[in-house]
Image: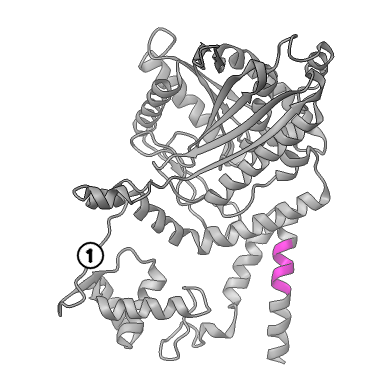
Amino acid sequence: WNEKALQHLSNHTLLLSHAPPCTSAFISHRNVTLNSSGGTEYTQLLISRRSKYRAGTRFTRRGSDATGAVANFAETEQIVLTHGNRSAIRSHVQIRGSVPLRWSSPANIKQYNPPLWIGLNPLSHARALRLHLLELWRVYGSSIVFVNLVDKGGSQGRLGRAFDAVLEAVKDVWKFGRENGGDCRHLWFDFHAECKKHGKYKNLVKLLNDCRSDLQRQGVLHLTLQKNSKWKCHSKQNGVLRTNCMDCLDRTNVVQTLFARHALFQSFNDKQVIALEDILAFKNNPMTLPWVESEECHRLLWADNADSISTLYAGTNALKREYTRFGTRTVKGQMEDGVNSLTRYYKNNFEDAWKQLGIDLLVGERGFSFVNPDADDNYIDLNWIPGDLKMSVVGGSHRKSRQYYAEQIDEDMTILHTDALMEIDRRAKSDGPWWVIDSDDELVEGGEGAMGGVSGAQVLLAIVAVAKAPLSTATAILCSLLPGLFSDAKKSK
């Protein structure tokens, strides 16, 4: 991820050798014993590698760019290492990524679910999807299955129908198929409609049955250790399941765990390794492995993976994590989802812009500016600073009227770097967030300083967002607002 950040060290081999490469990933493993198979021991290893291309946060990076790179693209590899006389390695890869069209939904404090914006140029959609498909075929093989979990109604339905139409057009115009490039298909499974009621997660078996033939055809990487201590390759995975929902987090986690469980069982689907009754038990209930310890370790690994990817992209643990971790849904889990949704709402509106700037600097989407502190005429460019903080930095540096600052910003978006950096440092040390104007000398619309607490407009916008949020999230938001409202009421009395 920090390749571009280290480019200035390319001529300094010694320094470059001490600069560690950075990546964004999850890795974990667990040792398991299959008691029903005479004590077969294996290690289950899970690795998720996130792409540095179009990297970012939940609402600042969505969809595809012109090169076909998509937001929140992650490759998850499940490796099973069998120990003992039958030392073997079996690896299965899945991927996730945002819907590969030109679309976005910028965070909006007025709405819990921001409006969806889909690009109007069909050619830009087609080119981005074509480049994305070509890259998937090049890396993963000739069989690509798009498992789409978005709703079939509302704005998500518009996005799903647009993707289906563009995919068919790309396949028709560029004549993609088994003989040219590779094979791909779009499987649209409305997760919320199928699993909206308590206990309906068993309907995911329908999705597994639809993908069973694809999993069988794509296969897995299978290696065995020979007597001469060399590894023999018996098969390779040719193709991949690409799962997505809107954020490629919560619904995607549940479904990828299901596919991985199927791949794990197939790793031992040998009558010489596991008992026949276990094969029949899993055939009747593919939602659970027939071995208690294996099922528990599988759930914990994939739940930890889900929380890690969700934290990196959305700022909180995954929703529906209770089902992934324990296989059930309770009221406590739904309330936890509400708290996480509230946290996401806050982070998406007030913190993710800064986080996105840091990610852009790390991966090289934005360049670093170098200044000479000894020069008298050194100026710093403020275009990278969000609007309200930009006004505050200029205001804190010169302490003049707000109207004058606005005129200066329109004319020349630069300021003496020493003054600007001192103001940023002062604001960073304060207790309030960046949008709170805490200087007595600065003027604020309405005539009151922001140190007085939450404004009426902020409360109103939060209530509007609550009205459109899920019930559990709305309850959490109201509980967090009530103490502040009562304290303001007492002060007014």
Bounds of the magenta span?
476-482
Q: Is residue 412 visible?
A: no
**Where's residue 48, x and y in %?**
53, 37
Q: In this image, 309 relative to 171: left or right? A: right
Which residue is more in the foreground, 231 or 270?
Answer: 231
SS category of the residue bearing label 1: loop
Q: Is residue 38 above or below residue 394?
A: above
Q: In this image, 370 relative to 315: left or right? A: left
The extreme front residue here reads 228
**Where's residue 40, x and y in %?**
73, 22
Identify residue type, mark 1. Answer: Phe
Does residue 479 belong to the magenta stretch? yes
Which residue is more in the foreground, 149 or 443?
Answer: 149
Image quarter (top left, top right, bottom left or bottom right) of the C terminus: bottom right
Name the main secondary structure of what is drawn in magenta.
helix
Residue at position x 21%, y 73% in the image: 379
* Quarter of the view holding residue 213: top right
Q: Is residue 431 visible?
A: yes
The extreme top residue here reads 179
Does residue 88 belong to the magenta stretch? no
Give the residue pinned by disc 1.
Answer: 370
The colour style of the image is one colour
Q: Is residue 352 above or below residue 322?
A: below
Residue at position x 41%, y 40% in the image: 119
* Quarter of the view holding residue 390: bottom left
Q: In this image, 11 relative to 152: left or right? A: left
Q: In this image, 434 relative to 227: left or right? A: left
Q: Residues within 10 Å of mark 1 (few under 14, many from 20)?
A: few
Which residue is more in the foreground, 165 or 238?
Answer: 238
